[in-house]
Amino acid sequence: MIKRLGRHPWVLSGIGSLLAAYLKLVYATNRFVIEPEGVHARNEEDLPVIVAMWHGQHFMVPFAKPAHWPAKVMISRSADGEVNAVAARKLGLGLIRASGGRNARQIRKRGGMRGFIEAVRALKDGYSIAMTADVPKGPARKSGVGIVQLAKHSGRPVLPVAVATSRSIELDSWDKASVNLPFGRGSIAVGALIRVPADADDDALESYRLQVEEGLNAVTKRAYELVGRPDG
């Protein structure tokens, strides 16, 4: 009964609302810097973009977005995903409820194909799409091919983004999630745009997948350096 109660919609909604309020507190009480300086202004002409992030490092990424950039975030249809969806909505993001997988069965079960089509349409309509590059449940920080497939079919570039704070709690989860804490320093690190041509074959997609993985690892490392601590 307790387990069922924990999955009740109003319980998940309440937790999501508290999460959004907490993340706003974290953002308001940390002194944030962004690198490189002026990066958002330079990327304006390339909108919309596909914002890539790692699982476990994603909680503060909504605050990396300028307020005037319309955006949607891809979130799984799990109970945990429902909490994140409520929080994302309260932080001003639109939603696409789907996630990827390592095989066709996982993709079907998680609504991956429907989410992919919805993401392509949203990008066409001018929404940037934020999504985690690694696939639940791991391995962590290993990009799946889905994000570069989306770039290929939409014609929109991938933008690696990482956010770190000087104070955080590291969880013992598959994605080594980092729970950011208030009253410290924060950083937003943004990488170079990664463009995937429409005629990219499987070998080329693997090369671009590695570019996304390397780009995300680089900005994650830099985000932590900016707040004076090692990654994780």
Image (cartoon, rainbow, N blue to C red):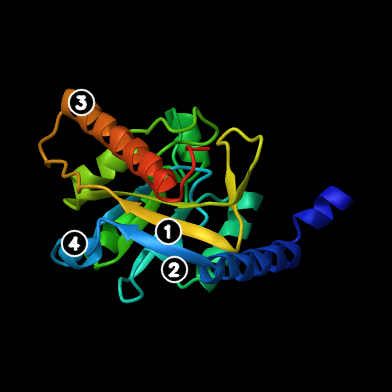
Q: Are marks 1 and 2 in contact (CB under 8 Å)?
A: yes
Is residue 117 in view from this perspective? Answer: no
Q: Amino acid at mark 2?
A: Leu
Q: Which residue is mark 4?
A: 43
Task: Pick out the residue farthest to the front.
Answer: 228
In the image, what residue occupies the spot 88% across and 51% down?
A: 2
Q: Which residue is mark 2?
A: 93
In three-dimensional space, the C-alpha distance between marks 3 and 2, rounded to whole angstroms, equals 32 Å
Residue 107 locus on image (x, y percent) = 45, 37
Label 3 vs 2, first from the N-terminus? 2
Foreground tag (2 vs 4): 4
Q: Residues within 10 Å of mark 2 (few under 14, many from 20)?
A: many
Q: Which residue is mark 1?
A: 73
Label 2 vs 4, first from the N-terminus? 4
Q: Residues within 10 Å of mark 4 (few under 14, many from 20)?
A: some
Residue 92 locus on image (x, y percent) = 46, 73
Q: Which residue is mark 3?
A: 202
Q: Amino acid at mark 3?
A: Asp
